[in-house]
Image (spheres, grey):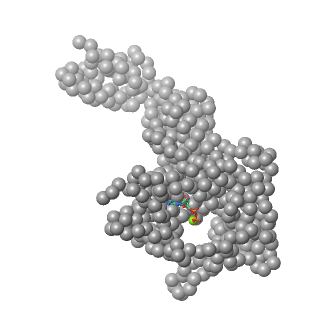
Amino acid sequence: MKDYEICIGLEVHAELNTQSKMYCSCPNLFGGEPNTRVCPVCIGLPGALPTLNETAVDYAVKMGHALKCTINKVSRQDRKNYFYPDLPKAYQISQADIPLCEKGHLEIITEKCSKTIGITRIHIEEDAGKLLHDSSCNDSLVDYNRCGVPLIEIVTEPDLRSSEEAYLFLNTIKNTLKYIGISDCKMQEGSIRCDVNVSVREKGTDELGTRCEMKNVNSFSAAVRGIEYEAKRQIEVLEAGGKILQETRRWDDVKGMSFVMRTKEDAQDYRFFPEPDLGWIVLEEERINMLKDTLPELPNEKLLRYTKIHGLPFTDASLLVEGLEKSRFYDECIALERCTSKNICNWILGDISKYINDTGSSLYDTPLTADKLVKLVYEVEKGTISNSAAKKVLGVIFDEGGEPDEIIERLGLVQNSDTESLKKLVDEVIKANEKSVNDYRNGKTNAMGYIVGQCMKASKGSANPAIVRELVAEILNER
Ligand code: ADP
Ligand code: MG
Ligand code: ZN
């Protein structure tokens, strides 16, 4: 078999979390009783006129800046004409030739390397309604609540080379949207969806192979499965001496297969034409720049800061970046400049995350503050309390609030760091464990851990383990 390379281009649709819809003042909210969040504009009654939601434009421009695009000062809105029952106007207002943003790029970063993915364009458009296929009555029902919900479509160059890269790209886009705060990114509510374009070619060739476009990809993991399936299918066709036909296919995630929807021959001609009811979108340079200034530190920038400057392991840094609250909390702790980054990170990704997951609460709704965590971790770093004692204190803070030092004192958790009294304890334990001492001196190095454990036990956990370890080592290594 020849050596093949997979080329993938994505079209990502993200719903914007504006208050109202794109061209009318209906609320932009998920769900609701079917057909209650509608008006003459979004269900396309004759004579109704659209008015552009400027916040949606601002949001799209922000994303354009985040993806290092050129922002077009003048862009156009166009009608994309097609008939489908979820689109009562029989056209979707979108942008054809002149999108709001174009020619950008986004880095995908892995532990070993990073790669730049070209962004062809970002444009704004409106969402369509939802068809519900009711098996109980053999009918199809339609809910127009989603009609006119603002979307941005982000189109990439065919620069992605594997399903892993595609997944990483989608995740980075999701995090970026979350950080800018322009989309809820609730996958289960369909706030991010994507079409996946896949082709394969022999490694070493420059020309792209014929692509297939896959629709109905409803999650990032479905995108991965769809890409793997599609690439394998295309390679099999080529290996059997066949040719790839340019087609639109429908991904069926349950069956794990894609099926032809239409071929290029019957490709739709949308007959785009300028939307006559809306003017050009004209952006002042000042507004474009002002929107750029509102951008927060972006996920990739954060990731690099955490790994390169704080020295956090890549996986830890990614986990922090992924959770907007966690990284905010972490940054607040680091700003207090008292504890090492890695220790703070461990607490956030460990016990704190567990508590948040178990209780389903937001980190900022708990009594824990950055100040309290830093005080607590500082006591562990100083050796005043043990790690397990700190866990207890954290539990108390979550349950009833309070200050770490007060809780430490109330529960009597201060470790014994008094070398004199610890030396006595160690001497006794060593006397009682002569066998282990001999084992150690005969080369069984793990006997030391056992003795330290015995000392901790004898102190009922109150001894400072670092000092105990030092004292034990001193005695064991002397001859
Ligand atoms: P449309 O879907 O409207 O035909 P385009 O032709 O601009 O739009 O392509 C849409 C997507 O398909 C882009 O993400 C682009 O990178 C990707 N694409 C185009 N050609 C190929 C190819 N040969 N292999 C993989 N992806 C491709
Ligand atoms: Mg397409
Ligand atoms: Zn409306």
Tell me, yes or no, if residue 210 can be seen here. yes
Residue 345 horizontal side relative to residue 1, left or right = right
Q: Is 209 or 338 nearer to us in this picture?
A: 209
Residue under the image location 59 percent in, 28 percent down: 337
Residue 341 or 237: which is nearer the viewer?
A: 237
Q: Is residue 149 visible?
A: no
Name the residue located 41 percent from the left edge and 55 percent from the top edge. 5
In depth, the one of 21 and 395 nearer the eye is: 21
Q: Is residue 371 left or right of residue 259?
A: right
Quadrant of the snapshot with the C terminus: top left
Decide if residue 120 is on the left or right side of residue 286.
left
Instruction: Tell me residue 230's x, y (percent).
Output: 42, 64
**Residue at 41% across / 68% down in the picture?**
243
Using the rendered view, name the quadrant where residue 432 is placed: top left
The image quarter in which residue 300 lies: top right
Position of the N terminus by quadrant? bottom left
Q: Is residue 252 above or below residue 441?
A: below
